[in-house]
Image (cartoon, rainbow, N blue to C red):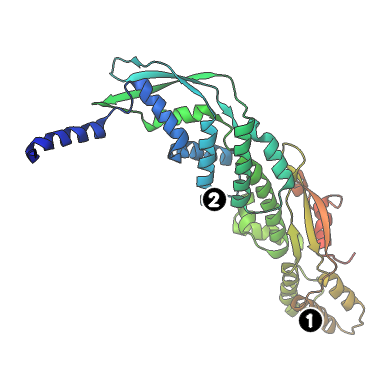
Amino acid sequence: MKKKLSAILPVLFLTASVLFTGCGGASADEYLGEQITAMKKEDTGRFSSLLDEQLSETMDINMYVLTFPDELREPYLEFLQKAFASVEFEVASADKKDNGSYAVQVSFTPLDIGGTTKKVNDAYAEAMQGTDLTEETSALLVKAAEAVKDSPKYSAETTTEIEVKKKGGSYAISDEEYEKLVSASLADCMAPYDTICGILDARDLLQAFLDASFKGEFTQYMKHTDQTEEEAQAWYEADGAFDPPSDLSPQYKERCTEAYKAILKQCKYSVGIPHKVDNLFHYTVDVTVTPNNSIKQASDEFYACTFYSMEEASAAYTETFEKYAAAPVYGEETTMTVELSLSSLLASQDENRDLYTLAKTICPIPE
């Protein structure tokens, strides 16, 4: 027997109403428990605020020049979700408050991500070969997730109160309350990222220092030193670094300076992966160099000749350096291990320091 459509519709509407406004838990504490379970398995979006907050803190503390890549965001959120999933939560019965909301006590032992991943972080850093921040951090996150699964380290048990509100026939938890729970349950979240970024940022600093010193390229150097372009240019040309001989005829001085700069711009060096010496900003770095012998060879060639006027000597001197600027000559490739620290950078003009020796190897000059 067919029922009238008008008799069926109220039942459908009632069912739809239950689906859209259902509690998702018979009580506030059950609802919270269900939400915690969902956070461990479903969308990683609940961990976005924690990632942003921790990134801001680590950038402020470490003053990294390298920025967090957009491509790394989802892998890092997935790692945080796996870390969160390793935490066991005990949800107490809800207490109704005077304003109609519920206070739910949640007990748990926070995961110490830094302690959990220290061994894999250190081992990865020691063996690291690549220089791509996204690729290297993503690879380390895989190993870090395995450490979370196999040998997690937890802090002392703690309890956090979460407010659950009731709206009609359903419950709701604010974003702030979710963020409070996530933040309290995961400690030292950026340890894997710090491991990779700290190393690559140090490498970028040395690369920037060399590029500014030899090639007059200041973009990264300005970021690391907070100098303006004018200040960096003044540093580059300080102490008459590109001044030609004082007795060179005036009409050749500018050409000679440009020849010097052109030779240095063609210096060849490759900065390797820094290795930490201690917990401070202190590394050793292998730098592979193909010595640019142009300045020394041009000088030797000029002084092997005899000239009978200052004009003739000035022209020959300038033309000799311009010749080597157009076609530099190089020695055999070599690799040097240098110390990289704030003190070594400040003392780079000290003849007894590694960076001074490195500079003389990159571009030998006459004694």
Tell me if residue 268 comes above or below residue 200 in the rendering: below
Q: Position of residue 343 (x, y in %)?
A: 76, 44
Write down the quadrant of residue 194 in the picture: top right
Q: Which residue is mark 2?
A: 69
Front-lying residue, 295 or 283: 283
Counting every numbered tag in the picture gives: 2
**Which residue is located at x 39 percent, y 25 percent?**
32
Residue receiving disc 1: 319
- Is residue 114 at least partly visible in the picture? no
Mark 2 Cα shell of 10 Å, populated few (<14), some (14-19), many (≥20): few
Q: At x 49% / y 40%, what residue is drawn?
A: 52
Kindly give the residue lying farthest to the front in the view shown.
1
- Image location (x, y in percent) of residue 37: 44, 30
The CA span between labels 2 and 1 is: 47 Å
Q: Could you tell me which quadrant the N terminus lies in?
A: top left
**Residue at disc 1, secondary structure:** helix
